[in-house]
Image (tube, rainbow, N blue to C red):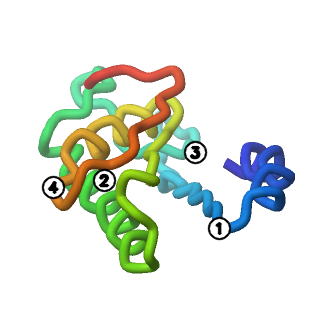
Amino acid sequence: ARFISEMLKPVVSMTPGLRLLFPQAPVEQLSGQSLASWFMPTNGQWIIDDTVAKPIVAYIHAMVRREISRGVQPDQILIGGFAQGAACAARAALSFPDAPLGGSVLLSHFFG
């Protein structure tokens, strides 16, 4: 996320009112290694089911609601992510109940 935010600084500075949010996945331990992960494997499978997705989607929905309360129109909001983050972003974008969103940007994405 830091790399992307640094790369996009020129775009943000040229676009008044543009806000980019880059939530970070929590750091988890897997086989003695620290890694940023929105969810951990279940029975060796990297699957995001409703139980796993619910708190992540609620977190993203809260971020979207905060932006709407700041005056951003829902159709101007895109939710994006990479890999696990993209799987979470897709679920959040497709399930936002308050209003239709502008869309989503999904890189190296999978439906869990």
Label 1 and label 3: CA atoms lie apart by 36 Å
The mark closer to the camera, 4 or 2, is: 4
Percent x, y of residue 2: 74, 52
In the rendered structure, which disc, 1 or 4, sits on the residue that comes first in sequence? 1
How far is the residue under mark 3 from the one under mark 2? 20 Å
- Tell me whether the residue at label 1 lies in contact with that at label 4, contact meaning CB atoms closer than 8 angstroms: no
Q: Amino acid at mark 3?
A: Ser
**C-alpha distance separating marks 4 and 3:** 34 Å
Mark pair 2, 1: CA separation:
26 Å
Q: Classify residue 22 as left or right of residue 38.
A: right
Mark 2 vs 1: CB contact within 8 A: no
Q: Earlier in the sequence, mark 4 or mark 3?
A: 3
100 shown above or below 72: above
Q: Which residue is mark 3?
A: 34
Left or right, 22 with reference to 59: right
Label 3 vs 2, first from the N-terminus = 3
Q: What residue is shown at x 27% (from left), y 52% (from top)? A: 57
Type of residue at label 1? Answer: Gly
Question: 87 or 72, which is in the foreground?
Answer: 72
Mark drawn on residue 56: 2
Pair 1/3: label in front: 1
Amino acid beneath label 4: Pro
- Residue hosting label 1: 17
